[in-house]
Image (spheres, rainbow, N blue to C red):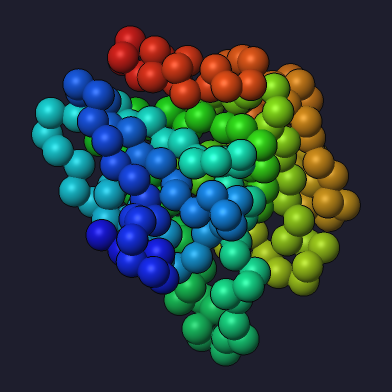
Amino acid sequence: TPTTPDATEPLLRSERDGAVLHLRLNRPLKRNAVNDGLILAIDQAFTGIASDVRCIVLSGEGQHFCAGLDLSELSERTVYEGVLHSRMWHATLDKVQYAPVPVVAVLHGATIGGGLEIAAAAHIRVAERNAYYGLPEGQRGIFVGGGGSMRLSRLIGTSRMTDMMLTGRVFDAEEGQQAGLSNYLVEPGEGLSKGMAVAHKI
């Protein structure tokens, strides 16, 4: 399993609860920001799903689900390298969306950029009231590279998604629920228990 630089903790923690597989983004000091290692860990997890798994719960360790791309590890790329990197994200999130079992994402704190793209690839989203959503890529001169523009437009409509992308508008949990970003809205700290309960009903 790909690990953090000190090799003591996996970037993606994996636990079983009966027929439910719980995958937890595990870079809490980085607000679970996504680097290549974490994307590859997600890809591996969704490539080798055991036959007795009936549902997957995807959550984030610490105070946030995922704050998006780890800009501290962002490097200059040629156009070709940029396309390949985007394709890697596309391939991984396609594995989430088209997994052989349903995926329940549990969202809290920052669910931003690439984190929102990951959430949009899930089939059911449980949000805590401290969750907030944004697509800051346009403000930073980069693009939504993991297929999120297609998935998000299906969830919340092209107009709302365009507003988020062009202006950097942030939705709070209530606005996200009303817009269709989440299926369930629960109190802070209750997201995982609700997500697991939903998963066990599947």
Does residue 155 show up? no
Q: Where is residue 89 in the image (x, y as percent from the top left)?
A: 46, 61
* Residue lying farthest to the right in this orientation: 167
Q: Quadrant of residue 41?
A: bottom left
Residue ID at (23%, 31%)? 16
Name the residue at the left extreme. 51
Specify the farthest residue to the bottom.
Answer: 78
Q: Image point 35% across, 40% down: which residue?
A: 23
Give the side of residue 142 with respect to residue 107, left or right. right
* 85 shown above or below 189: below
Q: Which of 62 and 167 is in front in this view?
A: 62
Vertical order, 199 against 151 (above or below): above
Q: Is residue 25 visible?
A: yes
Query: Is residue 192 left or right of 136 when viewed as pictured?
Result: left
Q: From what the image shows, is residue 74 above or below residue 188?
A: below
Q: In this view, does 70 lie to the left or right of 20?
A: right
Of residues 115 and 11, the one nearer the viewer is 11
Q: Which residue is at 37% across, 50% downward?
A: 12
Q: Considering depth in this image, is 41 or 152 the residue closer to the camera?
A: 41
Snapshot quadrant of residue 200: top left
Quadrant position of the N terminus in the picture: bottom left
Q: Residue at the location (28% across, 47% down)?
A: 46
